[in-house]
Amino acid sequence: MHMEHRVFLARLAGTAVFDPNGDQVGRVRDAVLSRPAPLRLPRVRGLVVEVPPKRRIFVPMGRITDISADQVVTTGTLNLRRFQLHADEVLALGQLRNSNFNVKSKPNSQKIVDMAMQLDQKAREWSITTVFVRESSSGFMRRAVETLIDWSELQIESHLATASEEQQLLAQVNEMHEADAAKFLLTLSYEVRLQFARDLADEVLAAVLEELPDDDRVALLQGLELSRAANILEEMDPADAADVLSEMSPESAAAYLNLMEPTDAAGLKQLLTYGDYTAGGMMTSNPVILPANATVADALAAVRVKAVTPALAAQVFVVRAPTETPTGRFLGIAHTQRLLREPPFTLVSSVLDTTIEAIHPAAPLSDVTRRFATYNLVALPVIDEVGRLIGAVTADDLIDHMLPSDWRDQPEVENG
């Protein structure tokens, strides 16, 4: 087992995580610390690791057998439940980095640039021991001074010692359904709303933004750091991310796209070529897709993934290779309800529904609506001119486009 003497967390971000067999399972995105308190080093409780498909999970430090700036190796036993931050925890990079603190030996406040963790061999615990800080400078053309200091030199304010009312409220927002969280955020001023957005995990914020009106989500994204906003857009459903980018200036949209993974950016650029009220403009480019030689067991495992919405989990789209959109030729739909009645080893290609006619991306809203009503669908395949699957329109996307643009602002009608 190899453990480096000191590991800087900002440098660790993005490092590949492997299982004992040498297979990559994800990448490090952050570290979870016990909430800082005076006279105590923050303990590193674990790492936030992003695993496919863009799900962030928590890996306790006790499950890590090897760690360095080049790789992290786990025991191979991972809990794939979506990561949730507890009230007595903070994210090292997501919350502490770029925060300002007073330092005992320095006259000006210092901004945390990076933090180093070290392993206490006796206690077998990792703690934050060293901090790389940059002096907050206001002098014209004056270069900021960067220094490596001990954590103990930071003056930990009392509001960091325990969870404040705002932090408790943040924890509640994390537990809300995304539609309820979005409704709550709309009751707050923009400044408070932006602070909540900065504190929420990327995956949670992305889900909440999908429920907000276009103007509000554009404003929140533009209030975040450019790189983080690009990460949020990658986390969002492609159809929603494309809607947000279409509301921005071409220059702003291009800046975000340039920071994204090339495959994600290419998909969004394609979606931006379609009109808002067309099948292409409403569709998601990431439905559940499997090859013809997949089994029923493969299909049920794919729709069981928590990140898959109920509308998309109702069916699997079967295609010729490749299985990334735009795929090979679209073959048909395997309905989850039918899959549940078949033996696990049955090929999905043997239970295909080929009666549902796919639609083309330029089809208007009226044609999409008629097709949904005709076939009683929850999702409709969208194909290009040569029969390749390029996405799917779901019932919730369709309803969003059928409702007035201000439907979220209208009061709910109570029963009784």
Image (tube, rainbow, N blue to C red):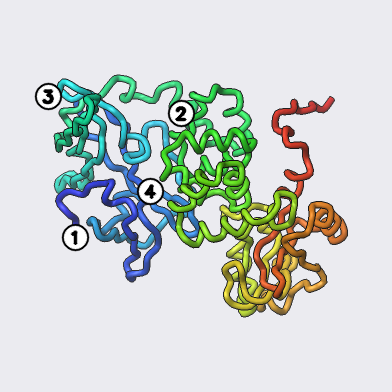
Q: Which of the pair 355/248 is nearer the observer?
A: 248
Q: Which of the marked residues, 2 or 3, is nearer the chain's N terminus?
A: 3
> Which label is found at residue 105?
3
User: How dense is the environment of label 4, judged by Cα within 10 Å: few (below 14), some, or many (20 and up)?
Assistant: many
**Would you name the residue on which mark 2 appears?**
195
Q: Which of the marked residues, 3 or 1, is nearer the chain's N terminus?
A: 1
Separation of marks 4 and 2 at Cα, in angstroms? 21 Å
Looking at the rendered image, the disc whose residue lies closer to the viewer, 4 or 2, is 2
**Quadrant of the frame with the C terminus:** top right
| Count of numbered circles on the image | 4
Q: Which of the marked residues, 3 or 4, is nearer the chain's N terminus?
A: 4
Q: Amino acid at mark 4?
A: Val
At horizontal 62% and vertical 67% (from top left) the residue drawn is 289
Q: Which of the marked residues, 4 or 2, is nearer the chain's N terminus?
A: 4
Separation of marks 3 and 1 at Cα, in angstroms? 35 Å
> Which label is found at residue 2?
1
Considering the numbered disc 2 on the image, is that residue within a helix, a strand or a loop? helix
